[in-house]
Amino acid sequence: MWRSVCFGMRKASSFPGIGFAAKSKQKNMPNRDIIVIGTSAGGVEALREIARGLPPNLAAAVFIVIHLPPTSNSALPEILNRCGPLRANHAIDGEAIRRGRIYIAPPDHHLMVERNQVRVLRCPKVNRMRPAADPLFRSAARAYGPRVVGVVLTGTLDDGTAGLLAIKRRGGVVAAQDPQDALYPGMPRSALENVAVDYCLPLSGIPPLLAKLAGTPAPDEDNYPVSEELKIETGITLAESGYMESVDKLGDPSVFTCPECSGVLWELRDQKLIRFRCHVGHAFSTESLMADQSEALENALWAALRALEEQAALCRRLVQQSRRRNQTLSASRFEKNAKQLEQHGEILRGVLQEGIDSRVEE
């Protein structure tokens, strides 16, 4: 299915917005000069190819989020500086946005944009990640509307999908790596399933597309107003005053609790997407919520197995103690309890092992 969908999109050789050139001179309309990219597993190699293919005179600023462990020392700026002509750095909170620069989210911090400045914040995780693509995409959509080009590359689960939808609604252009070309197809596949993606193409085709779009005038921003929902969600992530208590305007309370803080999760329906968000700002797609719940369940099962094995070991000690004291009835009772606990433990260990094996197969 992906082959036919992506091939159909690649056939179009024209780039939207070229027809606005004459009008842009009259209205002094800006180009599509804000490029936001989200990726996860397999992303370093993909970003190297992107950086290698971008021109030195790119008329746009590039913002990158890649999922990294919070304690990692990211060498991505140095890697990209060796690969391509554009200067790449970890973003600094409050710095000005400049064309021809690559801004990379530091580990354990969200990267976002406001009008004319970069924001780097250690605020609640989104889709179990910090940094995450959705906060960057949504903030860019709110601040720059049709000037934004959003791209989702290789990665697992579905971070970036909701953000692409926000960019699309604000008149921006959205693209996804062809899932058949991606090392991990989850993120681009989710984008294609839930968003009317403008371009689906292999990695090698993305740099020339971005260079072309960066020189294309953007539509009039007045035609794509900022929705109240976008204002609220971006405001919550940016910790802006007055937005934290507005989450109840986005949806209805669900039966689920936040895996991060145990607060109530509000259910948000976004066209085909169902998402969840709590009061303090943790946000989840359905896939990321399920992944977090699965992890919490596994941790609880391991804790239960540990408790069963400890209790069985204690019963075995009491068996030996009772026999030394010639307490036959007590020894028999403790022996029976130990066997039952060990049987329950074996069942639980089998459940855990089956779950681990199934993830390995996937």
Image: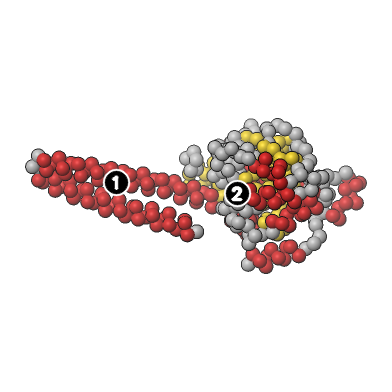
Residue shown at the point (18%, 50%) measured from the top left:
336
Residue 227, compared with residue 6, is above or below; it is: above
Q: Residues within 10 Å of mark 2 (few under 14, many from 20)?
A: many
Residue at horizontal 71 percent and vertical 65 percent from the top:
7
197 or 57, which lies in front?
57
Q: Position of residue 253 (x, y in %)?
A: 52, 45
Indicate how the structure is coloured in the image: secondary structure
* 20 on left or right of 91: right
Secondary structure found at label 2: loop
Residue type highlighted by circle 2: Ser
Res. 320 mark: none
Lateral position of residue 282 relative to residue 31, left or right? left
Disc 1 element: helix
The residue beneath circle 1 is 308
- The quarter holding residue 129 reads top right
Q: Is residue 357 visible?
A: yes
Which residue is painted at 63% across and 67% down in the image?
A: 1
Q: Amino acid at mark 1?
A: Leu
Q: Is residue 272 visible?
A: no
Which sits in the foreground, 304 or 23? 304
Residue at left 63%, top 50%?
43
Q: CA distance from mark 1 to mark 2?
A: 38 Å
**Coordinates of residue 300 in the picture (x, y in percent):** 39, 45
Q: Nearer the viewer, residue 1 or 78?
A: 78
101 vs 200: above or below: above
Within-10-Å neighbours for mark 1: few <14, some 14–19, many 20+: many
Q: Earlier in the sequence, mark 1 or mark 2?
A: 2
Residue 311 location, quadrant = top left
Write down the residue under mark 2.
40
